[in-house]
Image (cartoon, grey):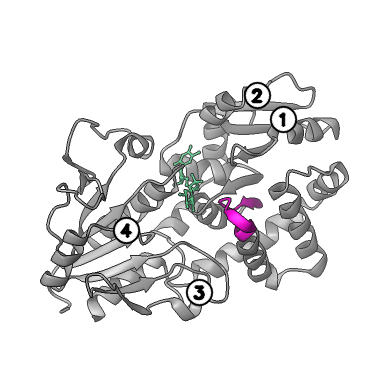
Amino acid sequence: MSNKSPIVCHLTCKVIDFFGDIGVAWRIAKQLKVDFNIEVHLLVDDLVTTKRLIPSIDLSLQKQTINGINIYHCDFSEDSTSLPPPPDFVFNLFNIDLPHSYKTLIKRKKSKYIAIEYLSAEPWVDNFHLKPSIDPQSGLIKTFFYPGFTNQTGGLIREKGLFLRREAFDQSRRKELIQSLGGDPNLYSISLFYYPIQKIEVFLDVIDHIKKPAQFFIPQYLFDLLKLKNNYQFIHIIPYPFLNHDDFDILLWSCDLNFVRGEDSWTRAIWAGKPFIWQPYIQENDIHLIKLKAFLKRYCEACDQDLSEILIKMHDDWSNNKFNEVLWRDFFKQQARLEAFVLKQSHHYFKEASFVDSLVDYCYET
Ligand code: TRH
């Protein structure tokens, strides 16, 4: 591909569950458009979930353009007739099954077919990044493209200007955000974004019992789903409406501790440079705990041994619904050390190539 011809791409997104499929798709689509002025056609099968992330979406439209990004409502069934013909590049987010007819068109057009995989810190990712694979049915060659934590992968999703935006975020903006959500800027602030299997009311009772004055920002839909109570002695529960990506970042930047999950909020917590606890997307046979262990091993490499052990214990406690009161009491005493460590880690990852930069470089090189 010459450096001159503009890239036109399809980005396919099948919403499996929760918000990460479209969350990551929208993040990538925005960066391709804003940072590289690439013509993006986002093909997505679930506009209702998409509307959470892109409130201006019109559910009745087959095709619409938002923020310069062309969004098609498609289905990816084998007999689908909703998929437009592929352009020069097809980015298959999370390597979903695509209809044979569409794959045949990709092959005939000789489009570059890239399967974007899930984020993992596991060592094997380095060896699979950029590996080709032949689709047995269509003979189509696809290239695996992995986000990751090393320079042997595509790197982490990070749009240009994020670091400067975060650095420009000051106490007055923090105060404004906290108050806009109904909180007290002087209180220790925790954002809670977790999977519904969490026995969150047990956790909240433990924090109230250790008499830790704090406010918890919880997405309104999770608060409603679990019918949480709100009559604690030392803690305050503040449900908040689903925020757009930028405001969600600002919430993470404003809090003293962030509980995040899945893939995209996990990455955003790393960029926030604030202490965080990550709950991996739950998988069968506890595969998600293997991912968690691999991440903590890599992330805590540059950390004091005792702080690393604390982070491992807290993640084990959180991902297994233990909520050990002594552990949490000690954990909060480590705030200053944790803040220094995670901020240093965010600076470390800010120096690495970003995922979409790597993806675009690859497209121009092939
Ligand atoms: O919602 P998730 O659990 O999504 C999951 C994971 O991505 C997982 O890897 C994937 O396999 C599964 O979906 C299908 O968590 P995640 O990845 O953090 O995505 C949530 C998105 O929602 C993210 O883009 C952040 C966004 N968000 C907001 O923009 N505003 C909000 O108020 C909240 C609570 C989330």
Q: Please report whichever mark, 4 or 1, sits nearer to the chain's N-terminal start.
A: 4
User: Does mark 3 have its CB less than 8 Å from ligand 1?
Assistant: no
| Residue at horizontal 66 percent and vertical 27 percent from the top | 237
Residue drawn at x 53%, y 27% is: 220
Q: In the rendered image, which quarter is residue 224 located in?
A: top right
Q: Residues within 10 Å of mark 2 (few under 14, many from 20)?
A: some
Q: Which residue is labeled 2 in the image?
A: 228
Whether the residue carrying mark 1 lies under 8 Å from ligand 1 is answered with: no
Q: Is residue 169 left or right of residue 90?
A: right
Q: Is residue 85 above or below residue 132?
A: above
* Disc assigned to residue 125: 3
Q: Are marks 4 and 2 in contact (CB under 8 Å)?
A: no
| 14 falls in the magenta region | no
Amino acid of disc 2: Leu
The amino acid at mark 1 is: Glu
Residue beneath disc 4: 97
User: Does label 3 or label 2 sit earlier along the sequence?
Assistant: 3
Q: Earlier in the sequence, mark 4 or mark 3?
A: 4
What residue span does the magenta drawing correspond to?
Answer: 275-287
Q: Amino acid at mark 4?
A: Asp
Distance from disc 4 to disc 3, alpha carbons, whole Å, reads 21 Å
Q: Outermost residue toward the right?
A: 326
Against 9, residue 82 (above or below) is above
Q: Is 279 inside the magenta-drawn segment?
A: yes
